[in-house]
Amino acid sequence: MSDIWGYQPTSGYIAGASLIGYKVEATDGSIGKVDRHSDEVGASYLVVDTGVWIFGKHVLLPAGTVSRIDDAEEKIYVERTKEEIKDAPEFDMDKHLGDAGYHEQVGVYYAGWHRA
């Protein structure tokens, strides 16, 4: 499951690049903007502010869900639908910072979606 927490080699991510403010696109439409991100090896992620789409909820997306980054358009494309993202475990900053089980729960959720 560790690959879900790393950027895909084909995503176009350049280590150290800032993605804050980039728009995030699910396979079926926009879900929000990047509020924060990490490119730590084995623990890379995006925190996306969904705005009014799901009542201001923030979601944690493992970097492995990123299929492509378009720097010119400042957009990040993820290989999940809006519904899959909406149904994900809710982002919890306290658990994110101090509970390894939380990352496992999120990782299992996203890794469980098998793409055809």
Image (cartoon, rainbow, N blue to C red):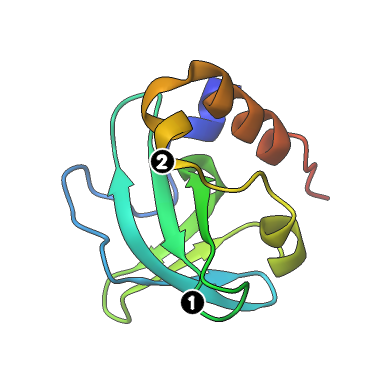
Q: Amino acid at mark 1?
A: Gly
Q: Amino acid at mark 2?
A: Met
Sequence order check, earlier mark of 2 and 1 = 1
Identify the residue position indicated by label 1 in the image.
51
Q: Residue at x 27, y 60 (%)?
A: 19
Q: Is residue 86 left or right of residue 30?
A: right
Callout 1 crowding tier (Cα within 10 Å): few <14, some 14–19, many ≥20:
few
Q: Is residue 31 left or right of residue 88?
A: left
Marks 2 and 1 sit apart, C-alpha to C-alpha, by: 17 Å
* Residue 108: quadrant of the picture: top right
Q: Residue at x 25, y 63 (%)?
A: 20
27 over 15 or under it: above or below: below
Give x and y (percent) for residue 54.
63, 72
Q: Say what secondary structure mark 2 lies in.
A: helix
- Which label is found at residue 31? none
Callout 2 crowding tier (Cα within 10 Å): few <14, some 14–19, many ≥20:
few
- Which label is found at residue 93? 2
Give x and y (percent) for residue 30.
56, 79
